[in-house]
Amino acid sequence: MPKKISFIAFALFAAIFLAGCTGPSAWPGLAASDKVAYLAHTNAVFAVDVNTGAELWQFSVGGGFLGSNPSLFVTTPVLTEDELLIVPDSGNKHTLYALDTNDITSDKTPNIAWTFSDVKGHWVAPPLVVDDRLFAPNSDGNVYVLDLTDGRTEKSAIEKIELSGESETNRLWAQPVSDGTRIFVTSLDHRIFAINLETYAIEWQHQLDAAVPGAPVLGADGMLYVGSLASKLERFDPATGDHESVKDTNDWVWGTPVTDGDNLYFGDVAGYFYSYNTKTGDWNFDPIQLDGAITASPLIVDDQILVATESGNVYSVLKDGSDFGVWYHPDQEGNVYSTPVLSGDYILVAYLQSDYYFVTLDRDGDVKRTFPEK
């Protein structure tokens, strides 16, 4: 099956699943501190000691995978400064859980600090923590603002920011980003919104030519950049919303670009990897085609950029583009759609349709362990 068709089929499958919750799973969500990996995979969330591979705890909800109302944990968990792990349930329970990672029961289950479920859509986007507030986009087209310090075990939103019109529901699938004055939210209905952090008013919105499944990023030049399914890299003035398309890409841009000084790094679903210079307004080098769709963000490690493809391979690209090659090749089948994660001295890569959920690699790309151990 051609690379793009394979990815499109999977993306559509995931969308149908999230709409009806009757299929197997979407791709997993992986986050980590320096010592602990947090993996949302199908119907459970796992905490794993990165140095030993030991499972520290597991969280699941009744009505498991084959039950009448299964939970679905696929969204990347978010760890707060108070070490609460915010876990969205993307199934039909429509619940946001805050797990206390410092309060683990004798059966290795974290206690629930609070929940929030006053929504009508599925949780897909990871929420954003800004000081003592949580900004949580839901696929019902609203961003819910929660007070993290109110002490309530059943949260109510202190604000519901409505982004939907009367006849449509925006699909909010990406984590917002903030410049300290506003938060920026992208939507599958082709729009990007700037919301004032204090008043919650929409300061501006702009409609692009296609859906925006990834999050925006702030460049070193102070501008806001985002890729879209119009196969373009777009630039916005964060204060005014003034917009221009700065570069065409070979195919859809699904993931979120990452920044390194004046440079932006990102990929597309045809497998092309790009390096854009915000100062010159041009590519740093000709796009490099890898062996599969790139849906995840790259990971910068030392002087190299690690790029995972749908094929399961992880490539290393030197920052100047002068050399690239396969950095890690799995010893079995499996697909990568999630962004690799740096945890201490290790790189973690989550796999779908594999015998293990994620692999722990050292900085040379050598396997230290898998979870679960194979």
Image: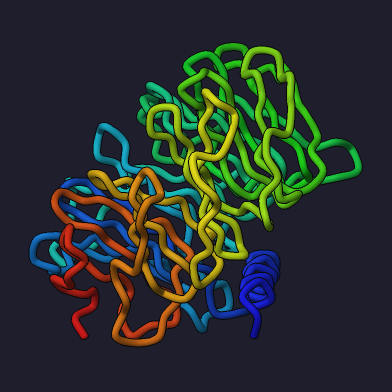
Residue 41 in the image: state x and y as whole percent.
40, 68
- Looking at the image, which is closer to me, 276 or 257? 276
Q: Could you tell me residue 130's position as x and y percent?
A: 43, 25
- In this picture, is 25 found above or below 47? below
Pick the quarter of the image with the N terminus: bottom right
- Is 270 in front, or is 287? 287
Q: Is residue 318 left or right of residue 198?
A: left
For the residue pair 17 and 6, the one nearer the viewer reads as 6
Q: Residue furthest front?
A: 322
| In front of the other: 190 or 110 | 190
Image quadrant assignment for residue 167 = top right
In this view, 81 is above or below 8? above
Q: Residue furthest right?
A: 167
The answer to which quarter of the image holds residue 359 is bottom left
Query: In x, y percent, where is residue 129?
Result: 42, 31
Instruction: Assign the C terminus to one quadrant of the image.
Output: bottom left
